[in-house]
Image: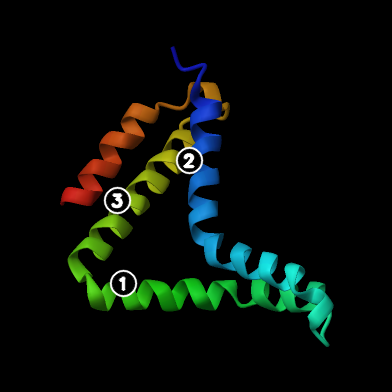
């Protein structure tokens, strides 16, 4: 029953990472594409883009909190509930991905989102 947790978790992590890095990946591809026209090294500039990522994400979060405060806080709460439940399950002894109760995580995430 729970043997399909691995692909579900990998897909969720990949979606989250791809959403967080979407603009940076586009920028890095553009730097590579136009590298022959640039004076600077595209790889060095790409590293600068990635090093700026934490501050960009924090800035995006701040802008979202101002534009849509209730939705932003609800999504943050839901994500925190899911992360907290995953940590609680690991501390309970469910150290293998197959033993994690993703339904429980979903219910906790919904509770965090709605409450």
Given contact means CB atoms under 8 Å apart, are the residues at marks 3 and 2 in contact? no
Pair 3/2: label in front: 2
Secondary structure under tag 2 reads: helix
Q: Residue 96 carries which label?
A: none
Foreground pick, 93 / 23 = 23
> What residue sits 67% from the left and 70% below the top?
30
Circle 3 is placed at which residue position?
78
> What residue sits 48% from the left and 50% below the top?
16
Task: Give the answer, above or below, for where 87 lies relative to 25.
Answer: above
The type of colouring in the image is: rainbow
Q: Tell me the CA gap for discs 3 and 2.
A: 14 Å
Does the rendering let one see residue 94? no
Label 2 neighbour load within 10 Å: few <14, some 14-19, many 20+: few
Circle 2 is placed at which residue position?
12
Foreground pick, 112 / 53 = 53
Foreground pick, 78 / 84 = 78
User: What x and y, as percent, mark residue 55?
Assistant: 53, 78
Indicate left or right for 97 with 85 as reference: right
Quarter holding the N terminus is: top left
User: What x and y, as percent, mark residue 76?
Assistant: 32, 59
Does the rendering let one see residue 76? yes
Label 1 neighbour load within 10 Å: few <14, some 14-19, many 20+: some
Secondary structure under tag 1 reads: helix
Indicate left or right for 25 with 15 as reference: right
Circle 1 is placed at which residue position?
64
Looking at the image, is mark 2 or mark 1 earlier in the sequence? 2
Task: Give the answer, above or below, for where 101 lies relative to 53.
Answer: above
**For residue 10, which quarter of the picture?**
top right
Task: Give the answer, above or below, for where 61 lies relative to 114.
Answer: below
> What residue sits 45% from the left and 75% below the top?
58
Seen as rendered, the residue at the extreme left is 115
């Amino acid at each position: 029953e729970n043997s399909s947790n691995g692909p579900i978790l990998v897909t969720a992590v990949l979606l989250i990472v791809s959403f967080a890095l979407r603009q940076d990946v586009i920028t890095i591809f553009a730097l590579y594409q136009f590298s022959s026209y640039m004076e600077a090294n595209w790889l060095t500039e790409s590293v600068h883009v990635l090093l700026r990522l934490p501050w960009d994400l924090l800035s995006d979060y701040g802008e979202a909190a101002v534009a849509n405060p209730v939705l932003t806080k609800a999504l943050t709460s839901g994500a925190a509930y899911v992360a907290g439940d995953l940590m609680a399950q690991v501390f309970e002894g469910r150290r293998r991905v197959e033993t994690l109760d993703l339904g429980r995580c979903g219910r906790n995430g919904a509770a965090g989102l709605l409450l």
